[in-house]
Image (cartoon, helix red, strand yellow):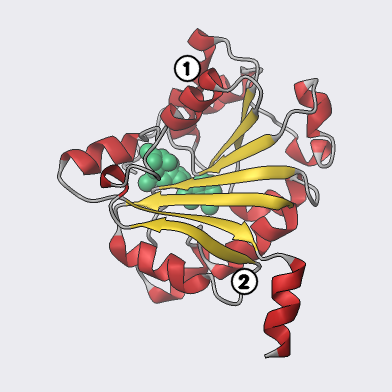
Amino acid sequence: MRLKNIPRARGVIEDSHFTVKDPQDHKGNWKELFGNDHPIHLEIGTGKGKFLLQLAAEHPEINYIGIEKYSSVLLRAIEKLEEMELENILFIRCDAELINEYFAEDEISRIYLNFSDPWPKERHAKRRLPSRTFLARYDRILKKDGRIEFKTDNRILFDFAVGEVPGSAFEITQITYDLHADPVMNEGNIMTEYEEKFSALGNPICKYILQKVSQGDASADSLC
Ligand code: SAM
């Protein structure tokens, strides 16, 4: 994402009651902050928030948290949210590397990764959000029946992500290399900003859904 530094961004984010300034204090207690025990879904690398804001508007029965590293990008999400006045969505400005400090075991029901940065240099592979390093972090906070949904138009990143799944705590339950042409996986699809941009250029969108390998399956594997 091209970043224009917006000097007022930090101040707006500090002042907004839609951003959580002390996420470590809510570890294990996010239900209290939302005031209900609805499932919590995260989007990591939420950008300007289009996808998550639309989901939150459509699903008041789910609580959403958007995680974004840069204030100048997150600012756009906060400004849109101030106009929408939704009560089931919050944002954290942080690096996703810290998620295990902010969320407890079994606290999260779903994680969305949309058009994650590719980090093309091999030495940066661990920074890729669908990498094995991150899958281990997601495993710790996701419930047993929790899932991860990842989509991108970057085939190299997608092939890397698919290759990271074996040996992780997850298995691929659904996969497509052309989401918009797949009537089953595309049902109810909400386009992200990047998805709109790149599909308009004719790029097919890849998507997978991961679920945790059940204990039974894992022990069966270990016997082989
Ligand atoms: N998800 C949006 C979409 O599909 O339109 C934005 C995609 S943009 C390519 C990736 C976003 O992820 C950027 O806003 C970037 O700042 C954010 N990001 C990348 N790595 C991150 C990390 N480790 N923690 C939090 N945000 C991150």
Q: What label sits on residue 79 in the rendered view?
A: 1
Rendered view: 204 above or below 26:
below
* Residue 216 coordinates in the image, percent (x, y): 75, 71
Q: What amino acid is found at the position of numbered circle 2 in the picture?
A: Ser
Relative depth, front residue between 16 and 80:
80
Relative depth, front residue between 121 and 105:
105
* Residue 171 coordinates in the image, percent (x, y): 57, 65
Which of label 1 and label 2 is nearer to you?
A: 2
Asked whether the viewer can see residue 49, the reply is yes
* Residue 110 coordinates in the image, percent (x, y): 62, 44
Q: Seen in the image, is 182 located left or right of residue 43?
A: left
Look at the numbered disc 1 and give the secondary structure of its residue. helix
Rendered view: 119 above or below 79:
below
* Residue 70 coordinates in the image, percent (x, y): 49, 39
Mark 1 residue crowding within 10 angstroms, few (<14) / some (14–19) / many (20+):
some
**Which numbered disc flags the more N-terminal residue, 1 or 2?**
1
Which quadrant does the C terminus fall into? bottom right
Rendered view: 172 above or below 121:
above
Distance CA(mark 1)–CA(mark 2): 38 Å
Give the quadrant of residue 86.
top right
Q: Seen in the image, is 127 located left or right of residue 145?
A: left
**Residue placed at 71% from the left, 34% from the top?**
39
Residue found farthest to the bottom = 224
What residue is shown with label 2?
168
